Image (cartoon, rainbow, N blue to C red):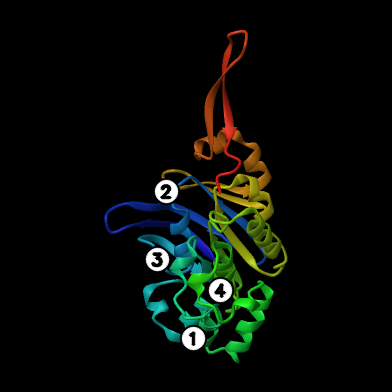
Amino acid sequence: MALERVTHAYPDGARGVNDVSFSLTGGDRALLLGSNGCGKSTVLKLLAGLLLPTGGQIRYRGEPVTAARLRERDWCRRFRAEIGLVFQHPETMLFNPTVLEEIAYGPARLGMNEPIEHARDWAERVGLTDYLDKPPYRLSGGEKQRLCLACVLACEPGVLLLDEPTASLDPRATGWLVDFLLGQKNLTTLVSTQNLSLAGELGDRALILGEDGGLMFDGSLRRALDDTDLLWRANLAHRHEHRHADGTEHRHVHVHKDWG
């Protein structure tokens, strides 16, 4: 899928993203990097068809994603099944009375065979088998994140979009998520994050949004992380003064290594 010179402005006039172009192909493991408010969540919602551009075009399998297309039941069902988005805050996705029903909801809506058994299988994969009859609100933060991931992956998407997935996770849950994603070899992933210390574990391609909502960089993650000036301009690093014992001073660019 691809964004072609996409701009999105919100009804109050606030601009989410500005003239952004990039494409995702099968098996890509990409990171969407940028500071707070630069438009990362907006980009993910555009890719998932939850927002439509106010300028430019989004293409999925070569076809434009439009309001009219999303009203076509069969096309929309396929699109929703193949593009999965996990929100930053799990509570925004959870509304069923039990964990089992939560995971089965998407497959049932998509008309998949045996959605309950499918849900049991995914609960086992993400380590939630012991919680099937529990209400989702009683799970811990890390367990809720696993549940949201299971809900999306149970629909068997080809593209997985993750919005700041480690922001509220403890180190153990973060390690589980990284290991789990590394095991999904055939899945195209785009992960938004500010946590540069984890970036190398989550992908190898960097898409960096500037504070104006424009795309500043699209290329190797390693090259991006080595470019401290680029990171500073994207507000992913800061400059501060060092004062030495001999009284000399100099300014130094410091990369924010752990914002999660």
**Category of crowding for the residue at label 3, using alpha-carbon neighbours closer than 10 angstroms: few (below 14), some (14–19), many (at least 20):** some
- Earlier-in-chain disc, 1 versus 2: 2
Q: For mark 1, what is the residue?
A: 109
Which amino acid type is shown beneath numbered disc 3?
Answer: Leu
Quadrant of the snapshot with the N terminus? bottom right
Q: Residue at x 61, y 63 (%)?
A: 189
**Category of crowding for the residue at label 1, using alpha-carbon neighbours closer than 10 angstroms: few (below 14), some (14–19), many (at least 20):** few
Q: For mark 4, what is the residue?
A: 152
Which amino acid type is shown beneath numbered disc 2?
Answer: Gly
Q: Which mark is residue 37?
A: 2
- Locate residue 229: give its quadrant: top right
Q: For mark 3, what is the residue?
A: 51
- Earlier-in-chain disc, 3 versus 4: 3
Measured in 3D between alpha carbons, the distance from the residue under mark 3 to the one under mark 2, in whole angstroms, is: 16 Å
| Secondary structure state at the residue bearing disc 3 | loop
- Which percent across, then down, holds residue 206? 60, 50
Is residue 51 toward the left or the right of residue 48 in the image? left
